[in-house]
Every structure is written in structure tokens, then in C-alpha cells.
Image (tube, helix red, strand yellow):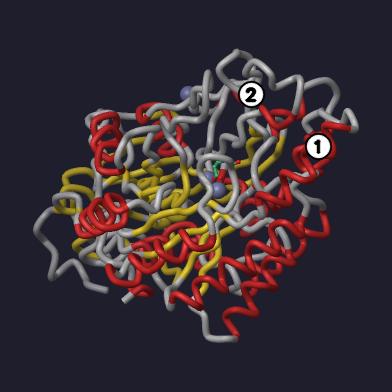
Amino acid sequence: MQDNALHSQPHDTVIKGARVVTSGTVTTCEIGIVSGRIVTLGTGLCGHEVIDATGLIAMPGGIDGHVHISQPSGPGVEMADDFASATRSAACGGNTTVMPFCLATEGQTLREAVADYMAKAEGQCLTDVSFHLIVTKADPVTLGQDLPALIAEGMTSFKVFMTYQGMRLTDAEILQVMDVAREQGALTLVHAENEDAIEFLRDKAERAGQTTPVNHARTRPVPVEREATHRATTLAEVAGVPVMIVHVSNGAALEEIQRAKTRGVRVLAETCPQYITLTADDLDRAGFEGAKWVCSPPPRDTAEQAAIWTGLTSGAFDVFSSDHCPFRFDDSHGKDVPGARKSFRNIPNGIPGVETRLPILFSEGVTKGRISLQTFAALTATNNARIYGLEHKGSIAVGMDADIVLWDPSKTRTITQDILHHGSDYTPWEGFEVTGWPVRTILRGQTVMQDGEPVGQPTGHHVARAKPEVAA
Ligand code: URP
Ligand code: ZN
Ligand code: ZN
Ligand code: ZN
């Protein structure tokens, strides 16, 4: 902490009056910003621009470590967000960085896919962006050439799938990919669901005429996630690498993670808002409405929600991400793609949530007294930055990017589609009431959201990352 005697030079911007959540403490101090970086935490600071944040909480800008933007999603299906709308929505929800995935289309190399995504994002983004890769092929070009080169260029994490026809890798392939991660010091993210078991259940349900959206949840029960989580952590153990299990939805999967940790495997875990607030009953709404809640793994029940809360409060989870995967409901390129009403199997998987992730965790976690402000900051920003190698992000500290979100902890809002900024035409949290709302988002010193609306030009850029510490 420094005082005004040392800092009579004006800053570009000073934020005054807020309770500031720094790593480890919550303290009232002023934040001095020069050229997009935090240069002073102190008192009596002067600045060309002074932001009066009295009564507000200053937190590190949210880092959403798991979003899907403009990703190919099967024949006739289009994602509802491009980089402009997704990052606008992210900024309005208190985020300053999002981490989307690069997925190659049929016949495309990973290198070509990355070039495409970079071009799509260029000049469009209201937040910073840092890409993960998706590996769907364990061929010589991917493993021997593209993956090592892209990791060296700062895309130091990638996801593999144990489910989804056409995307899943076999255990043998996952081991080969993990071996590249080990050699190159990258982090492997795993979507852990047993595809063969799901296929067995799906076929059976369809033969019995059970084709409505809720059957998506019924054919992806807890054991298919538990078994795949056990296998993913075991493969990581065999390969000698750390692994991040993404979108964990239930207590049994979390137990597998804990067991692997006890054996000494470096396992990290992510969960999402859908697993603490939604249930499989949401997919069981009349008509085709339940399609709005189709995502994988599916939301479970209140007992599993409680197990996820235990994980969040006990430190079993490292990060809390949205898994934003936006489709529209009311058009034939989204949830209602041709064939979707014939069988749940054809409904595109994924729900929108980049704008609601932080308010939901703040309200359900901080406001309701389940987690502290520091735990909130760790789960939504600081841990993401540390784990994924975003060296200048995720903390309010001298030398860091001035990525800051100001929260009004007493502002109560009802989440409705018309207050959100994503490209989807619905929110799974329609009518959900929250207390605590982000009122200003600041990206590298520039305000990008004020009072719920996007502000300014899209100056977000791609951030290359260091190799994750956990993978060193
Ligand atoms: O249903 C989901 N989660 N869709 C997004 C893709 C994924 O598996 O993360
Ligand atoms: Zn996934
Ligand atoms: Zn996802
Ligand atoms: Zn608006």
C-alpha cells in the first residue's frame, strides 16, 4: 500500500471508495491505473479520470475459462454468438477475458482452424480472448506438428472428448495426446462421459418411444460421468500429466477426482452454474420447451446440487466457468434443428450462460453466505489465470492488467432474456432472482460496460499464455 506523497503524479484513472478484493484480503483502498496496468494501490491518489465506487466492491474481472463461440456444431446448426455478441454479453456479465475453443472442421488442420478463429475474433471483441484447442484427431500432423507449435505460441491447453460421435477419442488416442501435453508442458482438459454407455441407453430409449428432451438427461446418468471421470484421471496417472475435468455435475464424479488426488494425480476440477441451480426436471417441460436446457453433462437433482456446493465450499473445485454454448430456440438452425423433435439425440447440446455465470455465483454463493468474496474471486478469475497461464490477469495487484469489475452487492435483479446481450433468444435462468450485480467492467483501464450496457469500441485482443505451472 502506498500513500499520496509518493504518488502525486496523476494516474490515467483512479478508482476510489471501493472495497477491493485482492489476493488474500478485502480492503478499502484506491486503485491507480496507468496505460492499462495497475500501478498503485493506496490512498489519496490523483487521476485524470476518477471513478467514484463508494459502496461498491472491486473484483478482478471475470475470466470465463470455458466458452464456445462460432463453433461448428453439426449440419444445419449455427451457434447463436459470434465474437462481437459473445464478448459483449461477457463484458455485461462482469468478465474481462473469455477462453473459447478452436475446433477444426472436417478436413481442416488445427493450425488452419486457429487461423480461422483468430480472423473471426480480430477487431470484434469487447473482452480479451485466449483460445484453448480441441483435439479430435491423433494423427501425425496434429500430434507431431500443429499441437507442439500452437502450444509454443501460447495456446497451452486443449480439450479432448470421451463422448460425442465424430469428436471423441479412444483411450489409446487420449494417451497419445496426453503424451504430447507432457512433452510440451500443456494442460489437458477432459469432457468425461462414457459414449458407449450413452449410446446403449439412447438406442434403448428411442426403441421404447422415449424421445422427448428429458430423455437426454435420462440417457446420460451419473454413472456414465463417474466411470469416465475415473478413466480420465487414470489415463492422466498413466501418462504422468495433470488433467482438468471440466463441467463436473455430481458428487460421484467429484469423489473419483478426490480419490485420484489422494493417489497423487494432479487433477483440477471445474463446475458451472447449471449444476448448482438447474435440474433434469427443467428438461421435462411441456412440448419441446425442455430443449432449452439440453447440455452435457445434464443438470441433475437437488442432492447433486448440494454435493457440488460441498465441492465449491471445501476447495475441491478450482474453477467455476459457464460452458457458454449458445443456440437459438426459435429457428431451424438452433435447438429446433430438423429432426430435433423426432429425438432428443438431435438437439444441439449446450446452453447460453456467459453473462449470468458471475451474478448467479455471487448471489447464490456470496450473498447467501456460502462462500467468501476471496473464494468468489479465486473461482471466477484468479485460479483461471494461474492455472491457464494468464500471467497478467486475474488479480488486483500492482503490475497486473487493470481488468476490474465493480459490483453492487445490494442490487437485486431478475434475470430475463431482455436484459441480456447474448445471441440466444432465451436464457435458461428466465425469472431467476439474484442479489449482487456487476455495474461496471473495466478492461485494461477502459470501461467496456457501465450500468448494464456495453460501452466503447471493441479493443479486446488475443492473449498468448505461459505454460501452466501445474504442467511444468
Ligand atoms: O452441452 C455442452 N456442454 N455443450 C458444449 C460442448 C461441451 O461439451 O462442452
Ligand atoms: Zn464438454
Ligand atoms: Zn463446453
Ligand atoms: Zn442492453
* Res 358 visible: no
The amino acid beneath tag 1 is: Asn
Q: Which mark lies nearer to you, 2 or 1?
A: 1
Give the number of callouts. Answer: 2
Q: Residue 27's x, y, as percent? A: 42, 69
Front-lying residue, 271 or 380 = 271
Query: What residue do we see at 56% from left, 51% from top?
Result: 409
Q: Real-space Cα distance between discs 2 and 1?
A: 15 Å
Q: Residue 183's x, y, as percent? A: 29, 71
Front-lying residue, 416 or 279 = 279
Which of pointers 2 and 1 lies earlier in the amino acid sequence? 1
Front-lying residue, 302 or 157 = 157
Q: Residue 14's x, y, as percent? A: 25, 52
Query: What residue do we see at 55% from left, 57% from top?
Result: 246
Going by the image, does 220 lie left or right of 69?
Answer: right
The amino acid beneath tag 2 is: Lys
Q: Quadrant of the N terminus?
A: bottom left
Mark 2 crowdedness (10 Å alpha carbons): few <14, some 14-19, many ≥20: many
Single out the residue that lies furthest toward the bottom: 263
Q: Secondary structure at mark 2?
A: loop
Q: Secondary structure at mark 1?
A: helix
Front-lying residue, 454 or 231 = 231
Q: Which residue is mark 2?
A: 335
Marks 2,1: beta carbons within 8 A: no
Q: What's the mark number on residue 394?
A: none
Going by the image, does 197 lie left or right of 96?
Answer: right
Quick check: 277 above or below 5? above
Q: Residue 281's x, y, as percent? A: 83, 40
* Res 150 visible: yes
Query: What residue do we see at 67% from left, 48% from top?
Result: 297
Q: Which residue is mark 1?
A: 215
Mark 1 crowdedness (10 Å alpha carbons): few <14, some 14-19, many ≥20: many
